[in-house]
Image (tube, rainbow, N blue to C red):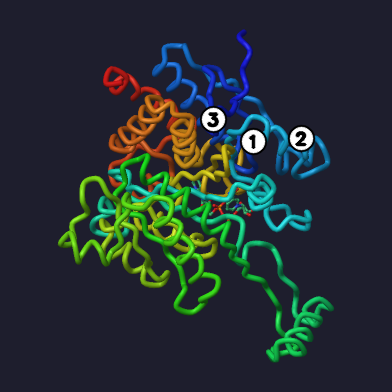
Amino acid sequence: MTKGEVITLKDGRLKVPDKPIIPFIEGDGIGPDIWKATKRVIDTAVEKAYMGQKQIKWMEVLAGEKAYRERGEWLPEETLEAIKKYRVAIKGPLTTPVGGGFRSLNVAIRQKLDLYACIRPIKWIPGVPAPVTHPEKLDIVIFRENMEDVYAGYEWAAGSPEALKIIGFFKKELDVTLSDDSGIGLKPISKRGSERIIKKAVEYAIKHNRKRVTIVHKGNIMKYTEGAFMNWGMDMVKQDYGERFVSEKELYEKYNGKIPEDRILINDRIADNMLQQILLRSDEYDVIVTSNLNGDYLSDAAAAQVGGLGVAPGGNIGDNIAVFEATHGSAPKYAGMDKANPSSLILSGALMLEYLEWHEASSLIRNALEATVKQKIVTYDLARQMEGSTEVKTSQFADAVINNYESFVMHI
Ligand code: NAD
């Protein structure tokens, strides 16, 4: 058997060999079932798209319950080291250990590897039941900042010595009076953190021919965190990309509201308004970039709008390092039943292939999965909402996706 190779860096870009070693974490609960299905779907797509010339050499790394059972640790250092070394990884959902010393293993992985951009493409899969009349109008990619904001992990319980000390400091040094029974949390948002996530979104828009980038923030209230996020971003875009971007003001003053062919619109929206905008003016948004908490709400709301909370893919990306993952949890009550929907992890796999620039295999998966849903072959979660559907198991859904490859492979 041919050995795999390490993905390296050349001129600041990933250099992907034909047989890259890619670490995977199968995950807890439904993780092993959906991972097994996903792995088959990815491997067969790569095989069909490149006729054996390319192949992923999978390498299992441990995290979560399996790591605890086998190593006595929830997140072994060697897992983080392997992801750092091999640069691209994929994971199933992990159950948050109760009393395990982690707020969330997923958050810990993102923080420790500096995976500062959470990327969620949100697009309707035709046939998936959606709560709105025109789910097809929404086709966005959300970039959520992953490291800062109220998720940074600095929180102290009401009445704790730390909270009381901070309250004392505010009163003495800044003349700010807070009630002694307050819990305290920090909301740090830095210039560097804001600029790098907004740059990621901007670069994505340029690379994928998207026409709009919208910075979402709550700067009308939180001026020096949320407002600064937007201002730093706008300044950076002006300075680093100049004429490539056009502001909303310029768009109406100079271009009659129509984005010129060779330019991209950069605008901003207040977070609460944005939740209305995606519903009422879905097709006016394209790439959205936002701070951590806003991004959390917005990505779930947008995914629900297209009926896809359980099927939406996701990736956590840093500088030349990325971990792709299902966006749902480990659904422990369906563990080991071959019942859960593997679509979110499968589509995260397609996203990973796109990141590797293996576009042919990535589109093959997406097209075949869409065709499968169109044929109304779905797992229980969608079957119960789709009239005339055929309910299949996790593994059978993977078979159906693979069976559909033949109709698309000739178009590659
Ligand atoms: P969950 O996503 O596991 O489940 C919510 C609901 O959706 C449940 O009814 C579940 O049965 C259903 N569901 C989820 N995924 C499904 C799938 N693929 N197919 C069919 N139905 C599916 O959320 P939860 O119950 O809040 O969390 C369970 C555990 O997962 C917790 O320990 C939580 O911390 C963890 N979690 C992990 C991640 C992650 O790994 N990124 C994300 C969210 C939650």
Q: Amino acid at mark 2?
A: Glu
Image location of residue 62, percent across then percent down? 71, 35
Q: Amino acid at mark 3?
A: Asp
- The earlier-in-sequence mark between 3 and 2 is 3
At 31% from the left and 42% from the top, the residue drawn is 209
Looking at the rendered structure, the secondary structure element under dot 1 is: strand
Q: Which badge, 2 or 1, is on the more N-terminal residue?
A: 1
Q: Is mark 1 within 8 Å of ligand 1?
A: no
Q: Residues within 10 Å of mark 2 (few under 14, many from 20)?
A: few
- How dense is the environment of label 3, judged by Cα within 10 Å: few (below 14), some, or many (20 and up)? few
Q: Residue at x 31, y 21 (%)?
A: 412
Residue of label 1: 25
**In the displayed structure, would residue 337 be above or below residue 168?**
above
Residue 293: % across, % down: 54, 64
Name the residue that disc number 3 marks. 11
Circle 2 residue: 78
Mark 3 or mark 1: whose residue is earlier in sequence: 3
Tell me the CA gap for discs 2 and 1: 12 Å
* Of the two numbered discs 2 and 1 in the rendering, the one whose residue sits closer to the viewer: 2
Report the mark closest to the observer, 3 or 1.
3
